Amino acid sequence: NKTVHFNEIEHEVYYFKPYPVEQLPEGRLGAIDENDDEEEDGQNSTSRYSNNSSMLPLSSEHSRATADFTLISTHHGRARRNLRNISKRDLRAAIKYGQKMPAHPDRHTGEPRWKFLYNNIVYITSGDCRTEITSYVETIKLEKVPVSAAQTEHHIEVKRILKEEPHLCTGHTYIIVDQSGSMRENDVNGFKTRSHAAYGTLALDFISEQISQRGPNQDDLFAESVTVVEMRDKGEILQERQPFDWILFNRLISRPDISRPSWHGNYNDSLRLVQGMILLEHHNLLKGGVEPSELPNFSLVFLSDGRPSDSDHQCAQQRIDILRSLADTLQSKFSLYALGIGKRDAEFATLASMVETVKNNGGMGQFVHAGLSAVTLSSTFSAISSTMTSHRTTLLTGANDAANGVATAAGGGGADSSSKQIKDFTMRETGKVVGMNFPVKTFVHRKGFDIKRYRFNKDLYKRETVPWKDVGFMNHNACGFEMETKPFGKGAERLAYRFNEIQYDTKTKKYIKAGNTMVAKNSILANEEETRDAFHKDFCRVQSTSYDLAEKFNDVVRKAPLLQALSGETRPPELKFMLCHVYSYKNNQTDEESSVLVEKELPGKFT
């Protein structure tokens, strides 16, 4: 079972409903008593095991090709599969690979039925497994997050800040969710309806990601607001200026069970509603003395499953005017993310043109056609979340510098303007002849420096003990390292240098490179304390955790029957994260200690 649960320390979610399969001898499953009426409606049934059930072997036909399983489709079965976008081949695969267990007998004739559970889809067949009765998707169940008294108090305080001190807000996000009648369709795998898919992925991959990616102190310094508008014939504000927190998360995951999609989907009324809120906020901030460069980001997420009901020429021009006014006013501070849920690209020409209008008038935008894939919808919300996180990091750095009187890369500063300036550096030249030497600094163990190489141990970190293990140099004869003085790459927080371990060559009486060239990284800021614990620990922890998660993901992919390579095909590529080490070097004369994070060099250019 792929289950995750929430708690205040490590946020996890029930992606798939845990199935209560008892621990039985291999190849056998207990009988399950089911409510046939719920199966007919395509809903989750409440299953229980019969204590006196017979022990039943799984099908002996598992070695046969999927296409060899003969099925007789009933009219009802075909209708259910068409409605829920389930193919007949999926049913064959379920019989071959899925969990097989007795279902509730036919309530009229008493004839036995079988239930197959595979890839989160449930199939009911006749007793001989040859006649299809019905099928339905086992819906993803998202659990509400327990909210503590402290979190409730913080929610109230952030709402106060958003109302009384709006200049402290780092970003406003407006989300328009299509709730027209077509959002009742049950064709997104893992969700009861399109509406459930929209709100589920919005909560899990957007709201939850924003909360989880925050640093430990950001809640105390910054506030961000979310406004959710439901789109039918008219736009209706569902949540207005709410903080990014678990209270909002809980409200969103429960919304599709309360609100029934209905009527038409008119774009313009909802867009005008959001336009009014954004321009009013913008006007009030400028009136309150906020500089244009210090304005927060205004992001609009527009999610729909088809073209607008208000699609005539006049309405189309009104949409252009609305979006053009927002982009002209806010420029790069305004972003539009348009997401389409549905089968045909042609249905989303309006969404794509809306994005182009914003981009052509100085704003930022992206259109994604998620189709009927919950995975694509999920990854799109995650990408939007990452974009917002990057913007928040920029604002956070600038605000911290201003609060501490620190100069930024552009200059300025206060009383301590030299404490955290950008380093004075020159980038490494490119396009030089291969073999040309570049200036390096050399550090030799026991020749002026005490050098150690450490590996981060996240298990020790979790136990709140020293998380570093001394593992010695990578190369057997190494006695130190050299690092180029000019970085070849730079990011928002770190500079990257070419790095080599070195060894002493007794023939030439010189130090030479040992092993392959690697990449060393340290802070882009001057006077940053670059020790293991002060600077590199968080980077090592994230990379180590990512490495373990990637291995678990690869293991699931390797075992998934539908992802096995067929004749002439290759397996899906594996996901890999590099492990990193920290080289710590202490000057024996001054006792000054510093460190660099080192990892394997990958060819290519990365941003």
Image (spheres, rainbow, N blue to C red):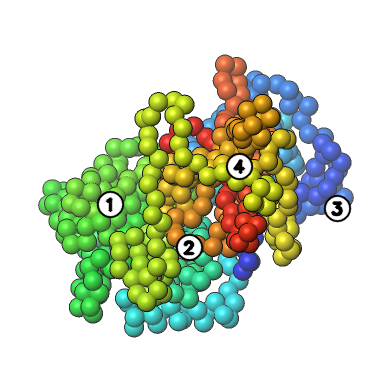
Badge nearest the viewer, 1 or 4: 4
Residue 62 vertical position relative to residue 216 in the rendered view, above or below: above
Q: Which residue is mark 4?
A: 481
User: In front here: 516 or 36?
Assistant: 516
- Considering only order in the chain, which callout, 3 or 4, is on the residue closer to the N terminus? 3
N-terminal label among 1 and 4: 1
Q: Pointer 2 and pointer 3: residues touching (CB < 8 Å)?
A: no
Q: Is residue 239 above or below residue 387?
A: below
In this rendering, which labeled residue sits more in front, label 1 or label 3? 1
For the residues bearing labels 2 and 1, Cβ distance under 8 angstroms: no
Q: CA distance from mark 2 to mark 3?
A: 69 Å
Type of amino acid at the residue the image marks with label 1: Met
Check disc 4 and give the amino acid type. Phe
- Report the mark closest to the observer, 4 or 3: 4
**Mark 1 to mark 3: distance in Å?**
60 Å
Numbered tag placed on residue 364 in the rendering = 1
Label 2, label 1: how many angstroms apart (C-alpha)? 36 Å
Outermost residue toward the top in this view: 568
Q: Which image quadrant: the C terminus?
A: top left
In percent of the image, x 76 and y 30: which residue is there? 59
* N-term-proximal mark, 2 vs 1: 1
Category of crowding for the residue at label 1, using alpha-carbon neighbours closer than 10 angstroms: few (below 14), some (14–19), many (at least 20)? many
Q: What SS does tag 3 mark?
A: loop
The kind of residue on which mark 3 rests is Asn
565 shown above or below 293: above
From the image, tell me which residue sits under label 3. 51
User: Given contact means CB atoms under 8 Å apart, are the residues at marks 2 and 4 in contact?
Assistant: no
* Mark 2 Cα shell of 10 Å, populated few (<14), some (14-19), many (≥20): few
State whether residue 227 is above or below residue 422.
Answer: below
Mark 2 = which residue? 527
Say which amino acid is labelled 2: Asn
